[in-house]
Amino acid sequence: MSDLADLEPRPLWRYFLELSRIPRGSRNEAAAMRWVAEQGRALGCAVEQDAVGNVLLRKAAARGGEGRAPVALQVHADMVCEKNEGTPHDFERDGIDVVRDGEVVRARGTTLGADDGIGVAAALAALADPELRHGPLEVLVTVDEETGLTGANAVRPGWLAAKVLLNLDSEEEGELTIGCAGGVDTVATRRVTRAAPAAGSVPLRVKVSGLRGGHSGTDIAAGRGNALRVLGQVLAALAAGGGCELASVRGGNKRNAIAREASAVLQVAPGRAAAVREEVARQEAAWRAALGAFDPGLSVAVEPGSAGPVLSPADAQAVVGLLLAGPHGVEAMSPDIPGLVQTSTNFGVFETRDDAVEANFLTRSSVDASKSALAARIAGVCALAGFETHTTGGYPGWKPEPGAPVVKLVDGVHRELFGKPMVVRAIHAGLECGLIGEKYPGLQMVSFGPTMWDAHTPDERVSIASVQNFWRLLRAVLERV
């Protein structure tokens, strides 16, 4: 890390590099939270920790700021743990190998954890800055943001004294986020029965791959293909031709990611293999034409499969029917903010097990009534296919308040520092602000941060220059708010 030692602002980068040495994947943040608490005590803060592991640091106002209202900085400690194939890294034990690559900082073969390690480091640097003329300052560091917003969900009413909250978990310099969507998961299951395949049948695997995937909120309107939907159409066409028994379907990896790959194993009657390959080729051509430049890498291929028991005809029909009809994509656009998706669903994961099949849908909306209505429609579609459903992981949206004083303040400071206004926006994704704001009515909130690219992937990197500008903005806001 010797080439990182001189990066400015030095306190921020020092905290980030120290934090990067500590394994802190979601639900494995205990050591990182101990470190946060230790840093807080060393800086003269009062330190509290709640039952789920969230840490709250409180620092008295700098001289002259005693009469100002408290301000909270809010960040999360956990990171997404992804690595390239062949990278010998154990996220349970190893720190992140952070490197400088020209004008960016990245990791060697893994996610960097700048999301939201830079935010944690900036909050601690603010507490440590002897020249910062701040009022009473609170720093709330939460756990398990990435997999379930668990920490934010557990924040208790009355814990924070702040009237203004600055969330430091945004990823584009110059943008000010003032609202986000809420979400809810629908999990659909169906019990299935199995039997031996027809005598002489050949196992073939139909595989959909090469799609771009992406974030199920921010990329849902980008026109990208969903591998589960493509596979459903292919299987329906093959079923219409006869001679195929369905053994298994598997696709998607995460509820909050657009499915990039999916596959099905079929037992194909003797003499039908050539017809199957021809139909798959036709479906690939049709889908490639439909997706066009949105997703040019689509591949639908047939390869040898592994023989095994097949689903009953009724179960196979139900599975293919849900793959065809399961909602996915944009439901409605915002009538108030041009270009903002208001309501959507991501058909994220489908898996066949020995005695059951399971599907997962993540529905998002900035309007709670619309979110509930779409989740109910998904349950209705699933019921028609003989699936039982339950919802889980629901969290509220964060309603944009573009006229709030804190919005005008941060935008005004940005104009003074950089000579241009911020891009004020809401996002079709979840932020912890929604959960926290529900428990603190009237709390003014905004979110901003430096520029990062490809978060949640081993290509994650952060702009050095944008971190410097982010720090300048944060310091100036804390002296004015």
Image (cartoon, rainbow, N blue to C red):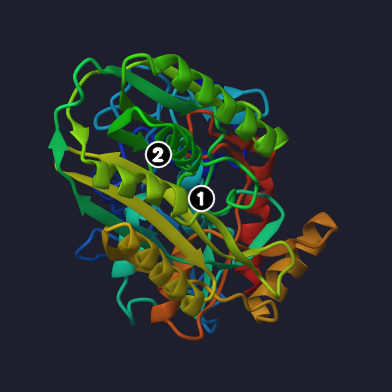
Element type where label 1 sits in the image:
loop
Q: What amino acid does circle 2 point to? A: Gly
In the rendered structure, find residue 287 and report the number of the disc placed on it.
Answer: none
Q: Residue at x 52, y 82 (%)?
A: 69
Q: Residue at x 66, y 29 (%)?
A: 296
- Which quadrant of the view contains residue 336? bottom right
Question: Which residue is found at the position 27% from the left and 48% from the top?
Answer: 358
Q: Residue 41's quadrant in the figure?
A: bottom left
Secondary structure of the residue carrying tag 2 is loop
Q: Which of 5/439 is in front?
A: 439
Residue furthest right as drawn: 419
> How many labels sit on residues?
2
Q: Position of residue 17 (x, y in %)?
A: 44, 35
In the image, residue 338 lies at what x, y percent? Answer: 74, 66
> Horizontal placement of 245 versus 120: left or right?
left
User: Residue 112 appears at what percent x and percent y?
Assistant: 47, 33
Q: Quadrant of the C terminus?
A: bottom right
Label 1 vs label 2: CA separation? 12 Å
Q: Position of residue 372 (x, y in %)?
A: 42, 74
In this view of the protein, which residue sits in the foreground, 250 or 95?
Answer: 250
Mark 1 sits on what residue?
216
Check contact, mark 1 vs mark 2: CB within 8 A. no
Q: Nearer the viewer, residue 430 or 360?
A: 360
Circle nearer the N terminus (1, 2):
1
Residue at mark 2:
252
Q: Amino acid at mark 1?
A: Ser
> Quick check: 454 left or right of 235?
right
Residue at x-position 50% and y-position 54% = 328
Q: Which residue is more in the foreground, 424 or 54?
A: 424
